[in-house]
Image (cartoon, rainbow, N blue to C red):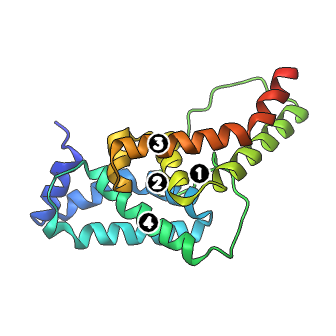
Amino acid sequence: MARTDVQLMLDVKAGDEASFELLLRKYRTPLVNFLYRMVRDTAVAEDLAQEVFLRVYRARDQYAPSAKFTTWMFRIATNLALNSVRDNRHRRMEISMDQTVGTGEDEQRPLEVPDRAPSVEQELVARCRAELIMKAIHGLPEKQRAAVLLHKYQELDYDEIAGVLECSESALKSLLFRAYETLRVELAPLVNNSVRA
């Protein structure tokens, strides 16, 4: 029977190094991808992920399963990412939210299903739409951006995201509502253009 993340972390607390290695392998890629979407720099995302796992390991003796392990880990990651964004506000880079960062070890390739190749025009339109969506998401205030990324890309539940952002669930819903409303307004031209096409 597979151990839960909480049980793995409790085993780490008891001195089991192999359990920490399992958590590292399980969450390294999703964590790096989340951090990359937050800070928009591969090297910084890798460094921050390493710092997250270092902090998780250092805090093993104080770990108490009051929340899900992922909530605790993503809270650490979000705080580090927000600090990094604030510290590096002058550096702006274009990115793709669909882009993932390779981690080398045990990386799973996405399932490739044969598909009709889109035309060059369709690819250009899709790329342009993705860039506009990315710009809109990265134009959101930091907490709103973090909430959207955790909700849409990490697929965390409201209670988990509220735990990560250290707010109530109702405050989170309000935060997400404002973020999605801003995105709806910003991205309205995309919807209107696709209806016409």
Q: Residue 147 versus residue 31: which sits nearer the camera?
A: 147
Measuring from the top left, give residue 148's x and y in whole percent.
Answer: 53, 46
Measuring from the top left, give residue 189's x and y in whole percent.
Answer: 81, 35
Q: Residue furthest toward the right?
A: 121
Residue ID at (72%, 52%): 135
Residue under numbered circle 3:
174
Residue type at the position of mark 4? Ala
Can you tell which quarter of the image residue 179 is in? Answer: top right
Front position among marks 4 and 3: 3
| Mark 2–mark 4 distance (CA, rounded to whole Å) | 9 Å
Front position among marks 2 and 4: 4
| Mark 2–mark 1 distance (CA, rounded to whole Å) | 8 Å
Say whether marks 1 and 3 touch (CB < 8 Å): no
> Mark 4 falls on what kind of element?
helix
> Mark 1 falls on what kind of element?
loop
Say whether marks 1 and 4 touch (CB < 8 Å): no
Residue under numbered circle 4:
49
Q: Which of the two discs, 1 and 4, labels the residue nearer the N terminus?
A: 4
Residue under numbered circle 1:
100
Q: Is residue 91 left or right of residue 22?
A: right
Q: Residue 54 versus residue 1: which sits nearer the camera?
A: 54
Crowding at dot 3, Cα within 10 Å, few <14 / some 14-19 / many 20+, comes out as few
